[in-house]
Structures are given as structure tokens and as C-alpha cells.
Image (cartoon, rainbow, N blue to C red):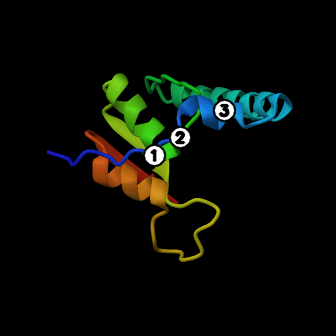
């Protein structure tokens, strides 16, 4: 049995989104939709079942929540974010996914 994931610092999802200007939100949403579309095409060509969702909030929490909600068999996640300088250490989001996920996690570099 996995431990319960930590929650954010009390800031609600609406507050995170409300603090971002509308133009920035639209640009982020457009970029996310483009990435999802491109990845979905590639995965479907490999006959993988794909479900996608765009969420706002703390990345690790949102990934784990989506995996639970969709009863995922596998989470595929990048090894590290842009702020990590050590090449062989996982980023904080990947660490939380590995530690708290209720399904398998594939970490890629």
C-alpha cells in the first residue's frame, strides 16, 4: 500500500489559475493542446489507448489524481524538470509519482 501523497500548501486550484493573466492562460492552453495532439497521434499509431486531460494545479498531485480517476495502468513521466542540474537524480514531480502512484511508473530521460 502506498502512502498518501502530500497536498499543496493550501492554495486552491482556482487561485493558481486566477493569478495568471488571460493571455498567458490561453497561450499555455494552446501549447498544451498541441503537445497532447502530437503525442496522442504517435501513441495511437502504436495502438496504445490514450486519454488526455489538461489540468491546472500542482503537477505531481494532478498527475496522481488523473491516474486514479482514469484507473491508469501506467504513468509515463520525464526524469527531471528544467531546474534539476544533477543528471542521475529524479526531479521532484517524478519522485512523487514513483513514491505515491497506485500503478506502475515509467520514468524516461
Give the residue displayed 81% in from the left and 34% down from the top: 21
Q: Which mark is residue 8?
A: 1
Residue placed most toward the observer, 58 or 40: 58
User: Contact (CB < 8 A) between labels 1 and 2?
Assistant: yes
Q: Identify the mark nearer the N-term, 2 or 3.
A: 2
Label 2, residues with CA under 10 Å away: few <14, some 14-19, many ≥20:
few
Q: Which residue is mark 3?
A: 17
Q: Residue furthest left?
A: 1
Q: Position of residue 1 (x, y in %)?
A: 14, 45
100 to the left or right of 90: left
Q: Is residue 82 visible?
A: yes
Q: Identify the mark nearer the N-term, 1 or 3.
A: 1
When asked about the image quadrant of residue 15, the answer is: top right
Dot 3 falls on a residue whose secondary structure is helix
Q: Is residue 55 visible?
A: no
Dot 1 falls on a residue whose secondary structure is loop
Q: Which residue is mark 2?
A: 11
Give the residue displayed 31% in from the left and 25% down from the top: 71
Label 1, residues with CA under 10 Å away: few <14, some 14-19, many ≥20:
few
65 to the left or right of 32: left
Amino acid at each position: 500500500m502506498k502512502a498518501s501523497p502530500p497536498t499543496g500548501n493550501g492554495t486552491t486550484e482556482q487561485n493558481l489559475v486566477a493569478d495568471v493573466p488571460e493571455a498567458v492562460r490561453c497561450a499555455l492552453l494552446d501549447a498544451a493542446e498541441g503537445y497532447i495532439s502530437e503525442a496522442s497521434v504517435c501513441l495511437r499509431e502504436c495502438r496504445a489507448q490514450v486519454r488526455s486531460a489538461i489540468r491546472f494545479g500542482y503537477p505531481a498531485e494532478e498527475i496522481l489524481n488523473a491516474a486514479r480517476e482514469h484507473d491508469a495502468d501506467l504513468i509515463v513521466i520525464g526524469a527531471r524538470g528544467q531546474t534539476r542540474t544533477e543528471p542521475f537524480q529524479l526531479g521532484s514531480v517524478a519522485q512523487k509519482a514513483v513514491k505515491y502512484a497506485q500503478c506502475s511508473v515509467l520514468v524516461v530521460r
